[in-house]
Image: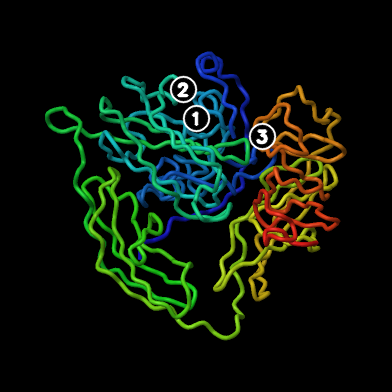
């Protein structure tokens, strides 16, 4: 079996650099949009959430495919050796984001070795011009605005750290604000949908590609650089790869009543295999970057037929494997299996009175029903139906300890997540009352009619009690409004009763829709 990519988590101090990018501000419009992590506001980058497969940080985490020992890899790649997903900085690139010379590191001192730029220093990945496939690996996914890709210009200086002037935009992949991994909750881990990015035909030799993942629910983005060698043929023309990978072989699997695990032997390719497509009963399930896949969306005592194909960096897909049919086991009469423990509990940001919690979802042989939050060893009274929770009405400048447990539909309770220790900020005398004339950005907090709200994205003049751009974080119930969208955990009053939303909803009447839970 192929060895899995390691995902070590290491403490690190986040450093945000607020220098101006004056030249780019003159030629680029201000971005008023909302990928990832408010770790810059006092959190810990150990829980940051995404990297590009075969990018510079990812290659560092593999010790250059075990060609380096730990000390050599650590000196060359810094914190990326244990945490390739941790390169995040303010979003808005190229207007905002990390400073010139600190783009590869995101401005983090612990990732500073990634900013070294000199010929023949970094391990390169062969590519051809035209469409190439890029795959993001998410250790904890987020709601997403877009991904955007840049490449160094012709004649760039490969002996100096990257600057904005040396990069040009080559692809933007817009997203609708939903989770980066389709059909999975926020916080889920796994491989995202592949992106096809066109490499300009006038590039050859060594270049650097920058991929940026903009999340929708924080003020940050993830930054990943990839070192590539764009190949040409003997006539000096850019080569076009039309050769598909070899077909995966030795597909096999095993099952329980609630899951099927597949394994296969890796394919080969003249350029390189990018990912594998897994098909179940003829339907494509998901791209995976390893030679194994666990299907947890199966029913007991049921037959399923699987096939696997390989896709290379140019998008060429191999033939499928021979079909493999597996039958799941019968379900036991009584469910006594506990869910897996929630993973990577972390804070997405703190204020003087709030802590924004997030974690990786649990799995279960039947289904996870909800999560329990424990603060300082005491369970909070609210069941949580999402993988995030805003804890409110806290004391300023105070340390709190959190754990999370999962509960399945049979009432089985998981082991606890990791213990999270976090401290709220000191109180600020700054005026926070909402002002219709003021511009607010993602993460800004305001008071309106005695309640506290946080902005989801850029806004001006939109009332916090009626506009979707504002999220209520005070622990109160407001009168239900059919025109307003509500998130998991929001409380409303309807016909004299208090209800709490289990997941995102709009226009569904409390007391008549299962999305609302009566309190």
Binning the other alpha carbons within 10 Å of mark 3 as few (below 14), some (14 to 19) or many (20 upward) gives many
1 or 2: tag closer to the N-terminus: 1
- Looking at the figure, which quarter contains the N terminus? bottom left
Binning the other alpha carbons within 10 Å of mark 2 as few (below 14), some (14 to 19) or many (20 upward) gives some
**Residue 222 versus residue 418: which sits nearer the camera?**
222
Q: Residue at x 68, y 60 (%)?
A: 513
Residue under numbered circle 1: 103
Q: State left or right for residue 462 relative to residue 75.
A: right
**x, y percent for residue 102:** 51, 28
Q: Residue at x 24, y 68 (%)?
A: 322
**Residue 427 versus residue 194: which sits nearer the camera?**
194
- Disc 1/disc 3 C-alpha distance (Å): 22 Å
**Residue 489 versus residue 207: which sits nearer the camera?**
489
- Looking at the figure, which quarter contains the C terminus? bottom right
Q: State left or right for residue 38 relative to residue 212.
A: right
**x, y percent for residue 403:** 71, 60
As drawn, the residue found furthest toward the bottom would be 333
SS assignment at label 2: helix
Q: Are marks 1 and 2 in contact (CB under 8 Å)?
A: yes
Residue under numbered circle 2: 164
Residue under numbered circle 3: 442
């Amino acid at each position: 079996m192929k060895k899995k990519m390691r995902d070590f988590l290491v403490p690190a101090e986040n450093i945000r650099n607020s220098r101006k990018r004056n030249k780019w501000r003159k030629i680029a419009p201000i971005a008023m949009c909302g990928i990832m992590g408010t770790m810059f506001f006092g959190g810990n980058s150990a829980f940051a959430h995404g990297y590009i497969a075969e990018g510079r940080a990812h290659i560092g985490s593999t010790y250059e495919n075990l060609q380096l020992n730990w000390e050599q890899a650590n000196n060359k790649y810094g914190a990326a050796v244990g945490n390739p997903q941790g390169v995040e900085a303010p979003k808005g690139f190229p207007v905002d984001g990390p400073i010139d010379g600190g783009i590869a590191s995101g401005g983090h001192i612990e990732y500073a070795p990634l900013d070294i730029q000199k010929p023949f220093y970094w391990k390169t990945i062969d590519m051809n011009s035209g469409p190439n496939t890029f795959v993001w690996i998410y250790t904890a996914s987020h709601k997403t605005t877009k991904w955007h890709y840049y490449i160094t210009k012709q004649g760039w200086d490969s002996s100096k750290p990257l600057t904005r002037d040396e990069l040009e935009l080559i692809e933007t992949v817009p997203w609708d604000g939903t989770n980066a991994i389709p059909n999975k909750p926020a916080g889920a881990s796994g491989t995202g949908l592949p992106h096809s990015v066109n490499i300009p035909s006038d590039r050859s030799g060594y270049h650097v590609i920058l991929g940026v993942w903009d999340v929708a629910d924080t003020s940050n983005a993830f930054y990943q650089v990839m070192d590539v060698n764009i190949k040409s043929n003997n006539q000096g023309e850019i080569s076009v790869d039309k050769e598909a990978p070899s077909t995966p072989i030795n597909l096999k699997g095993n099952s329980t009543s609630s899951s099927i695990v597949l394994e296969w032997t890796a394919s080969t390719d003249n350029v390189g295999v990018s990912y594998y497509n897994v098909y179940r009963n003829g339907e494509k399930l998901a791209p995976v970057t390893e030679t194994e896949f666990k299907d947890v969306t199966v029913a007991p005592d049921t037959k399923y037929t699987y096939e696997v194909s390989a896709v290379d960096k140019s998008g060429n897909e191999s033939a499928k494997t021979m079909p493999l049919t597996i039958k799941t086991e019968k379900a036991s009469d009584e469910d006594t299996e506990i869910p897996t423990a929630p993973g990577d509990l972390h804070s997405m940001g703190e204020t003087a009175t709030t802590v924004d919690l997030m974690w990786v979802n649990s799995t279960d042989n039947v289904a996870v029903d909800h999560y329990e939050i424990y603060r300082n060893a005491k369970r909070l009274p609210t069941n949580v139906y999402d993988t995030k929770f805003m804890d409110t009405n806290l004391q300023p400048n105070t340390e709190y300890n959190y754990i999370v447990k999962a509960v399945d539909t049979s009432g089985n309770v998981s082991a606890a997540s990791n213990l999270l220790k976090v401290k709220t900020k000191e109180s600020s005398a700054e005026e926070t009352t909402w002002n219709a004339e003021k511009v607010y950005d993602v993460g800004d907090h305001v008071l309106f009619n005695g309640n506290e709200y946080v902005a989801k994205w850029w806004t001006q003049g939109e009332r916090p009690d009626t506009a979707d751009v504002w999220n209520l974080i005070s622990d109160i119930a407001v009168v239900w409004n059919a025109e307003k969208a509500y998130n998991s955990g929001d409380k409303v009053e309807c016909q004299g009763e208090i209800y709490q939303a289990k997941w995102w909803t709009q226009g569904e009447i409390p007391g008549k829709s299962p999305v609302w839970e009566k309190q």
